[in-house]
Structure formats: C-alpha cells, structure tokens
C-alpha cells in the first residue's frame, strides 16, 4: 500500500483496518448492454493514529452516480431534526442559511426557510450552515471543514449530520465503506477536526437513520458558546467504550464482511434449491461490494428493484444483475424480496402490500450474515 496521509490532520501514521479487495466503483452503474468486466479499484479503510479519523485509503474513481430517489425515512428524519434544532433556539428568524448538500440528493433549505431563515448569497456569511452527509464526499477533509468555518457568521451555528462510526462498528456495517465516501466520522474525530478550525461542538441529537446518525451543532470558540451538553458528552463516552480509535476494534469489520457475503450466498443458493424466486430491492452503493464478495449473478439473484428512474435499464456494477423498476414486482411475483437498504423497510411494505398479501417476504439482507441462514430473516 502506498504511503497514506490523513485527509484531516495530514498525519502519516495509522492502520489499514478494512480491505475489501478490488471492487467496481460504487457510483458507476453500466447499462445492461455494456459488456464487462467492469473496471475495479482497491477499496480500503485507514484509521489515522493522530486524530482518529477513519477514512478511505485512496480513490482513483471518478464520481458518476445516477441521482437516487430520496427515501421517506430520510425526509422524515430531516423534518424531525429541524424541529429539534428549532426547539433548541438555534434557528434565528430572519437569519441567513446556507447548505452544503450531498450528491445523493435531498435538501433542508425548504424546511429552514419555513422557520424564517433566508438563503444566504453565495459569497456572504451565514448564521446557520447545514451539512447533511455532504462533507464525507470531500477528498480533502481539512479544507472542506475550513471552508464551512470561514462562511460562519459571528455567533452562528454549523450543523453537521453524519453516520456515526460507533454505529458502523456496533452494527457491523462494513459496507458503509465505498468509493467516493472519504471519511467515516466518530464524534471524537469530528471534535478534533472542529478544534483545528477553532470550532467546538456544544449540542447533539441522535437518530435511528442508517442504524445511528448524529446531528452535531458547533460554533466558534471565540463566540464563547456553552460547554458541550450532556448529549455531546454521552457520545464521546460511548465512542471511548466502543473503541472508535482502536484499530483492532475496527478490524473486526473484516470478519463481518466475510460472514455477510457467505451468509447471503448460502441463503440464495438454498432458496434456489427450494424452488424460491428471490429478487433484490435497493440498488444502493452499499450493495455493490456485497454482491461482488458474495460472487452473485442473475442465476441466483435475477434482478434488483430500484425506484430511481435514472437507474432503470442499468445493472449492478461488477455483476450481470439488471436493475428494474418497481412495476416489475407485480410481474415477477417474488416469494422473497431482499432489502439492501433496511431504512426503506416501512416505506416499501406500505407501497407494495401485495408482496406479503401473496405470501412473499421482505428479507433484510444485512441480517443474513449475523445468524444461521436457516432462519427466515423476515422483516
């Protein structure tokens, strides 16, 4: 492995904690008529020993991801987050707001404008800056945070939402690692990064999204904001208990990856032998490495359903498995649907009641490596 320099603190000492081998770019979905093999690249996670940031170790890919459809769970969580932040008195009516968005879509600006904030012009400071899963897409983490800090008006608040590393560890979410996602934040590492930009976290809120999402509020040290609240202190204490800066703890994700891939393939082989017809749902980036590690093709998984019109007619990277529209659920009449994004569970069950009415099951694909595959795994 080439010498690694931390994306946040520029430190050069750390550990490779997860290596998924050669993987296709998670944001490259080729057409069904494009003959493989697809190009592959190393996919590895590195943990900085100095600041504790878990990060993508190199990435030669070029982001090209088709825009996905925003899940109802994400929309609902955004509304609840804005409600909590407003209740804390951090959304000044008449203040200016700017947003650093995610390339995956979704925006909080409409919600924030509904709270009386006005969108700041491109060059002016903002009283509220929101970054919802945006900064993780920046290769240079130090510069990305410094840019946000520079836009913050005096007395303003920076709101950073991230999928927490302690949840990734506790839930064994090894497939959170993907090309184009350069950082995996613990609250401990985020606090160190904020300190380098003369910012401090003072409030936090947690959500169930993705198994554990944090919204952190930070302000300038010079503004004399309050000491970190109980929620921030609790997150830091849990980080310590989980071991988010312990390379040996993070290395446990390697075993989870192997068990997950083996469990998924074994379940699909058993399903085919039993005459069942399973298909997938959710052509998400997190499914790409899983399908490749499990060595799947359309003989075991005939299709993956996805609601995004931009992905119709494409296929899963590194496989011959086609991506088809939700209308195919009625035509195929599967007796089992493997859900690759568990946060979609309530939404898809409500939108496609005929699956269960016809005796079919929604199966959480993430569960297949965590218990004996003889179990049903039904949701």
Image: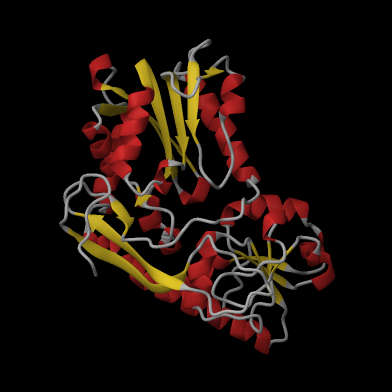
Classify residue 124 by image quadrant.
top left
Where residue 106 sits in the image (x, y, percent)?
Answer: 59, 39
Residue at x 66%, y 69% (from the top left corner): 31
Residue at x 27%, y 27% (from the top left corner): 199
Where residue 66 sits in the image (x, y, percent)?
Answer: 61, 55
- From the viewer's side, name the closer residue of 142 and 60: 60
20 above or below 269?
Answer: above
Residue furthest to the bottom: 273
Q: Is residue 90 visible?
A: yes
| Horizontal side, residue 48 vs residue 99: left or right | left
296 above or below 110?
Answer: below
Quarter of the picture containing the C terminus is bottom right
Classify residue 311 by image quadrant.
bottom right
Residue furthest to the top: 94
- From the viewer's side, name the closer residue of 88 and 291: 291
Residue at x 24%, y 70% (from the top left corner): 1
51 above or below 316?
Answer: above
Where residue 215 sits in the image (x, y, percent)?
Answer: 43, 35
Q: Is residue 308 visible?
A: no
Q: How many marks?
A: 0
| Horizontal side, residue 258 vs residue 378: left or right | left
Classify residue 352 by image quadrant.
bottom right
């Amino acid at each position: 492995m080439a010498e690694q320099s931390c994306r946040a603190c520029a430190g050069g000492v750390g550990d490779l904690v997860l290596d998924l081998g050669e993987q296709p770019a998670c944001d490259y979905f080729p057409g069904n008529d494009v003959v493989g093999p697809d190009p592959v690249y190393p996919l590895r996670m590195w943990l900085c020993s100095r600041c504790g940031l878990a990060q993508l170790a190199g990435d030669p890919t070029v982001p090209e991801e088709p825009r996905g459809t925003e899940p109802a769970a994400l929309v609902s969580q955004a509304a609840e987050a804005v409600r909590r932040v407003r209740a804390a008195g951090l959304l000044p009516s008449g203040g200016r707001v700017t947003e650093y968005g995610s390339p995956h879509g979704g925006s909080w600006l409409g919600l924030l404008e509904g709270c009386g904030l006005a969108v700041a012009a491109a060059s002016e400071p903002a009283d509220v800056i929101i970054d919802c899963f945006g900064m993780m897409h920046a290769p240079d983490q130090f510069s990305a945070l410094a840019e946000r800090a520079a836009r913050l008006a005096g007395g303003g608040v920076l709101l950073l939402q991230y999928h927490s590393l302690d949840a990734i560890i506790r839930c064994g979410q090894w497939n959170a690692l993907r090309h184009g996602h350069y950082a995996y934040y613990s609250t401990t590492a985020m606090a160190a990064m904020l300190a380098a930009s003369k910012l401090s976290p003072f409030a936090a809120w947690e959500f169930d999204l993705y198994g554990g999402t944090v919204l952190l509020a930070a302000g300038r040290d010079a503004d004399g904001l309050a000491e970190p609240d109980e929620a921030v202190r609790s997150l830091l204490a849990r980080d310590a208990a989980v071991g988010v800066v312990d390379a040996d703890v993070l290395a446990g994700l390697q075993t989870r990856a192997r068990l997950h891939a083996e469990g998924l393939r074994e379940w699909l082989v058993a399903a085919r032998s039993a005459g069942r017809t399973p298909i997938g749902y959710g052509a998400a980036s997190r499914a790409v490495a899983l399908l490749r590690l499990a060595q799947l093709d359309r003989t075991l998984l005939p299709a993956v359903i996805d609601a995004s019109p931009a992905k119709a007619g494409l296929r899963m990277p590194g496989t011959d498995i086609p991506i088809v529209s939700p209308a195919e659920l009625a035509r195929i009449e599967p007796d089992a649907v493997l859900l690759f994004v568990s946060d979609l569970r309530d939404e898809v069950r409500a939108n496609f009641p005929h699956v269960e009415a016809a005796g079919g099951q929604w199966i959480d694909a993430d569960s297949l490596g965590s218990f004996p595959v003889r179990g049903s795994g039904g949701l």
